[in-house]
Amino acid sequence: MAAFPRFSRKATGLPCGPTCWITTQRVRCVRLAGSEEEAKMLGMLEKVREALRRYGMVAAGERVLVAVSGGADSMALLYGLFWLRKEFQLDLAIAHLDHGIRADTEEDLKVVRGAAEDLGLPLFFARVDAPSSAKKEKLNLEEAARRLRREFLLRTAEEVQAQKIALGHTRTDLAETVLLHLLRGAGAAGLKGFLPAAFPFIRPLILCGREETRAFCAAHAIPFRDDPTNLDRRFLRNALRLEFLPVLKKHNPRAEEALARAAELLAETEEALSWTEEKILGELGRRGGLDLKGLGELPRPVQALAVRALARRHGVVLYRRHVEAILRGMARGQAAEFRLPKGLLARIGRGLLTIAQEKPKPTGTWPLPLGETTVPELGWAFALRPVPRPKTLDAGDPFLIYVSQAKIAPPLSVRAARRTDVFRPFGEKREKRVWDVLSRSGIPRWERERWPVVVDERAVVWVVGVRPSGDHSVEEGEEEVLSLRAWQL
């Protein structure tokens, strides 16, 4: 990265010579010959001022890094902020990134460098290879370029100690983004497009159309470069801009404003939905999941909202098919498991909807000596102690049992339940499969595969939290017994 030094030639402080003047309150225009374009240009500057104020984009004394590609939008943004810098007490710097996509990008840098010299502002630039990055990261070219640009701007802002990064997105860009996301079937989060301010990024041109930025540049003889790739209709965004938006404007000349207004309303809706999500997750959160009973009492669209929110907490955005499958599973009221992106599993069972990373089945066996033992692989801990025989052997706690020392064939150990395990549950005469006992107790299959059983050298002593073995029960006359407690980590 390099920085160009300040140059002595300065830009005029007035945006349009003798035909207008600027106050801190508003821009006034004296209508002379050909003043329609001038009126458009002055309107743009006033809209930038309005956006800066309405959305609280900047604070006095801040340094703003202006992202300038050399196109009409970014050049209009640069000069507009320059002429408003004293009013808002801003310190400006320029950032330019060559994405390595076109062969003529050196001309873009010349235009930006000329502006930096004209305004006496520092310029920071870098070159990257977006096509190679796209291939390496398996992204489309647009996504790769956007990621590289964001990284460059954030890195540069940190280096120059800029509090804000100004982007040249206009109302036209917002309208295109809304249409693009609409065609992809996005919800409120996508249809809101982009926000005027998502700090540190700000978009001072959000109230301006693309025609206004070009008029601004024309009125001031500000040079700019048109990117020829913007005319390539193979890209959906370009096709929307060149083919679809003009059709909409024939039916509604203010189509861009209508779409931008819809995006603003959807942004408010998304904010309300986010508040609702947090409230649901807070009220229905149980042991790392959501209470199924409470979730089932909500309207179905709100259930879907909660499912998506829970997934986002685990770093994954669900497709509609995933949400629909989970909701159908909840409606059936049976234990079920669903595979999600990034190796996650959604599980319905034991009164909870949970989302967790898929883990391999534990295959080890861990000794249980006297004292406390933690087994992270199973997610449980145990305490084994000899104690005087209590008055009652019913502890009233399914995770605490008393067993006969005389009937234990040491050593004691713990492992995950196996489908072949059998034992005689306390109070019953016949042996039963541990797997069946777990199933009848409401333990879903994926938990059965990890459910701990305490065993001795010969048999199962305890299906933890479910049933102790009758073959290891305390007999009359035993004065000392083994206390065995378990708890989940």
Image (cartoon, grey):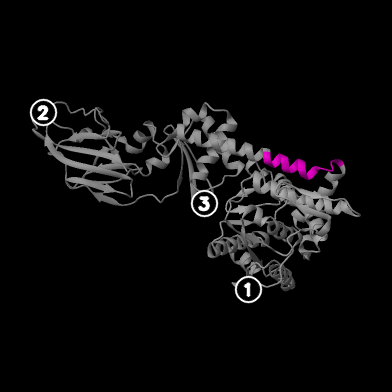
Instruction: Where is residue 426? Give x, y as percent.
Output: 24, 30
Question: Neighbour class for label 1 at 10 Å: few (<14), some, many (≥20)?
Answer: few
Disc sitting over residue 476 in the figure: 2
Indicate the amino acid at tag 1. Answer: Pro
Question: Neighbour class for label 3 at 10 Å: few (<14), some, many (≥20)?
Answer: few
Indicate the amino acid at tag 3. Answer: Lys
Disc sitting over residue 5 in the figure: 1
Q: Quadrant of residue 320?
A: top right
167 sits to left or right of 239? left
Look at the numbered discs 1 and 3 and tell me whether their residues touch, using CB distance below 8 Å. no
- Quarter of the picture holding the N terminus: bottom right
Q: Which residues are magenta?
A: 251-264
Viewer-closest of 295 and 9: 9
The reply to whether residue 419 is visible in this rendering is yes
Disc sitting over residue 121 in the figure: none
Secondary structure beneath dot 3 equals helix
- Quarter of the picture holding the C terminus: top left
Residue with the mark numbered 3:
342
Q: What is the C-alpha distance between the residues marked 1 and 3?
A: 47 Å
Q: Quadrant of residue 218?
A: bottom right
